[in-house]
Structures are given as structure tokens and as C-alpha cells.
Amino acid sequence: QKEVEQNSGPLSVPEGAIASLNCTYSDRVSQSFFWYRQYSGKSPELIMSIYSNGDKEDGRFTAQLNKASQYVSLLIRDSQPSDSATYLCAVRDDKIIFGKGTRLHILP
Amino acid sequence: GAVVSQHPSWVICKSGTSVKIECRSLDFQATTMFWYRQFPKQSLMLMATSNEGSKATYEQGVEKDKFLINHASLTLSTLTVTSAHPEDSSFYICSAPLVGNSYEQYFGPGTRLTVT
């Protein structure tokens, strides 16, 4: 059974600080990794995708991938209250497998 | 980014009736679409994979005769919840991937179904 694991949270981070979200996956051959943001009552929105080891930056977001450790993370710099949401990690094999999400709460 | 629409955005129906939900890819063709269900405060649950021109592939535990999927064109997939019951009340979301190297998946806005 292929799995994607995330801490459910809630993770509380002060406004302006760095929020760090983590995800591990079980299938070594996974090639594509994604982070989605989901606001309450809304559908998920793609934030970042990453395919090779290392860091990928897009604005305030940085995705980090370590295939040897089967670990992918998302850093959010200068956290804003509008970043408060559930963040879903997803890994692609023959289909996309989602983690259960981490609830992030940015404290004003 | 790619746009996926869903219709209706919300629907209330009586127990025993059927409800059809449409999922459209607006600016790209999607030979595959995915249907998810999400109960309050729970994660996405993949129900089925919709394949253009062929039968859908259902996940274990999902009744194919209850959740009818039709993928009649490269831009449209429909999910029909037949003989709906209150326990079918949920948030139904479709998604379509941009096939290629990225396989990024784009979600529709979702349909909130309430069965009374």
C-alpha cells in the first residue's frame, strides 16, 4: 500500500515567520511531487510541483525534495494570515496519492 | 494555469433521486479525469478515474452502479449519483491532469451535495 504521510497539525506559526510543512512517502520510485493548498470549503489549489532533488523556489514558497530520504517539504516565508489553510502533499505513481493534509494557522 | 469547471456548485436533492455533476476542462483536453469525495474535516478520497471513450476505473469500495461516470468527450466528464441517500452528502471534486512531463493536476471548484 503506497502511502503519503503528513502531520495533521494544527501547526501554528506567528505572522511573518517561516512555516515548515513536511511529508514522507513510501514508494521509492515516485517521480513527481506536489503541494496543494485547500481553504475550508474550497477545492485544492496547486501551489508547487517538484521533480528533482533539491530546492525549488516560487515567491514566498520553497519546495524541498530528498528522494534518498523519501521526504518532501514546503517552506512558506513571511507567513501571512491568508496562508492559513490545509496543505496537501501529493505524490505521483500511476496516479496521484494525497496525504491527509496539515492544517496551518498563521497567528496575527 | 489550467481551468477546470464544475456544475452545479451546490445541489440539494431528496433521498432516492439521482444527481448529475459535470466536470469540464476549459482550456485543455483531458483524456483522464478524476473524481474525489471529501467529507467534512477529512482528506480527499479518490472515487474513480474517468477515461475518455472507455469505462471508468473505480477504487475499491466505490459502487460503480451507484456512481455512474461518463467521459463522453475530451473536455467533459459526468458523475451521476443514483438513488442518493443522506450518507452520500459530501463535497465532490473533479480534477484533470495536464499530461506530459509534469502531470500537474488541476481541480474543479467542487460540488456540495446535500441529500435530505
Image (cartoon, coloured by chain):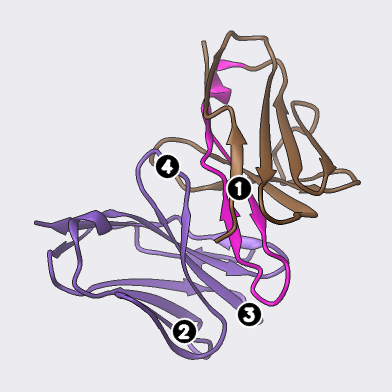
Circle 2: element type: strand
Chain B pictured colour: brown
Circle 1: element type: strand
Residue position for label 1: B4
Residue position for label 3: A31
Establish whether labels 3 and 4 are both on one chain: yes
> Disc 1: which chain?
B
Q: Amino acid at mark 4?
A: Lys
The x and y percentages for residue A60 are 29, 75
The x and y percentages for residue B30 are 75, 54
Quadrant in which the N terminus of chain B appears: bottom right
Task: Sort mark 1 into few (<14), some (14-19) or many (20+) by Cα contacts within 10 Å.
Answer: many
In this view, the mark in front (1 or 2): 1
Residue position for label 4: A42
Q: Earlier in the sequence, mark 2 or mark 3?
A: 3
Residue position for label 2: A65
The x and y percentages for residue A23 are 42, 71
State the mark number for residue A84: none
Note the chain letter of the purple one: A
Disc 3 versus disc 4: distance between alpha carbons?
27 Å
> Disc 2: which chain?
A
